[in-house]
Amino acid sequence: MSSNGECFVVLPANCVSGTLIVGRNAEDEASVGVAEEVCYYDVSDVIGEGKTDGGAAAESSNEDALRVILQKPKPGLWGGDFGANERGVAVGLTWTDGEEDAKDNDSLLGTDIVRLTLAVSSDVEAAVDRIGLLVATHGHDKTKLNFIACDSTAAWLISCAGKVWAAEKVESSFLRLPSGGLTVTTTINKSSEGLDAEASFAAAHDAEAQPPAEDWCGPKPSGDGTYTQHDMFETLRAASNESSSRAATVSVLSAKGICCHWFTATPNAAESVFKPFVFAPKPRISPLTAVQSEAELTLLHKLHSQRKPAALEHLRSLERSCVDELNNYFSLQDHASDELDELLKDCVEAEVKFYR
């Protein structure tokens, strides 16, 4: 199982309404035909009764749990490769290596760490510390991982090798984070105890360094506070690769307003549309984004693969209308009411009507 993902993050100085926007393209050439699920976890089930993908027991209590929306790279997993919680924290995997050796070995996979971090983290620094604790406790010696963690104020990059880790706070106003290789090198703002701060973390752990790239795809942030979620949609579409792109996600994180999380839940952002989710009082998402018993694909994925070319143009128009309507709602409201409980469900089911 691979959980690679190319990420783009744009900090608040560039974004409309002072939001932070992060986007991720899930990439894996070996698993293009496998469905990426989108699942919602209430506080009663986000810990998953202690079950994990790597075999180690989850150590959190439901008393501390937060609601989570999660994208899963493979059906049947407890964890995910990208997600967000009701406190406006988003966490994603950007690269994994050696995880096949970690299964059933009392370890945590990267997907477990995403879920268990989101389940209890009230802000991004708490998420960084939580990732570090989980890695130090249940990391596997042969595993290397990269994460990105964000809230409305900041973004952090976290690189892990075995049971040691190092984290760097993003200072650039925007960056592109490639999938492949460890990201953190010599700029280290948090780390395992006793880590040699003079050495490159990536080089010290026998991994090729992949520092953030300066090039960009799609609309480029201009520093004037005009970058929007739609610009990030177009960035992910421009960066997507038909041969390896499996799904795309965008989180718009707001300090004072409503955070909104957008999922294609279908392959190749260039051929897909984004659907929104917010943490309303009692969210309900469509069963069409989950793999049903004895099936191999989500129904949304299956119908999307059988679509007629003309459907995409109509769906893009619906996507633009949805963005406009939600932006208007968010400009007037600072919390999500129950009228948004079925937002993602309604958008998924509207999409499916164009495929039937």
Image (cartoon, rainbow, N blue to C red):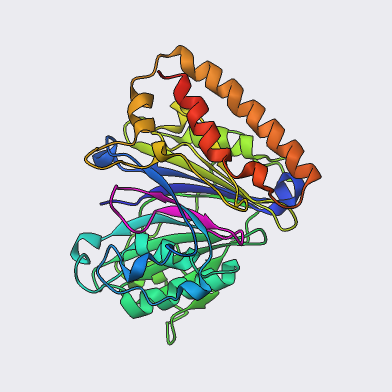
Give the total number of marks visible in the rendering.
0
Q: Is residue 308 above or below residue 172?
A: above
Q: Is residue 24 above or below residue 91?
A: above
Viewer-side residue, 70 vs 3? 70
Is there any visible trace of residue 274 in the rendered image? no
Is there any visible trace of residue 251 in the rendered image? yes
Q: Is residue 41 above or below residue 188?
A: above
Residue 75 sits inside the magenta stretch: yes
Q: What residue appears at the point 34 percent right and 36 percent down from the top-left corner?
A: 298
- Residue 334 is left or right of residue 45, and the answer is right
Which residue is situated farthest in the bottom direction here? 194
Which span of residues is magenta-colored?
A: 70-90
Q: Quadrant of residue 38?
A: top left
Q: What residue appears at the point 59 percent right and 24 percent down from the top-left corner?
A: 318
**Residue 307 placement (x, y as % from top left):** 38, 19
Viewer-side residue, 298 vs 240? 298
Main structural element of the magenta stretch: helix, strand or loop? loop
Viewer-side residue, 35 vs 234? 35
Viewer-side residue, 230 vs 279? 279
**Residue 288 placement (x, y as % from top left):** 40, 36
Split into 4 quadrants, where in the image is the C terminus? top left
**Residue 319 placement (x, y as % from top left):** 59, 28
- Residue 261 is left or right of residue 269, and the answer is right
**Residue 87 placement (x, y as % from top left):** 61, 62
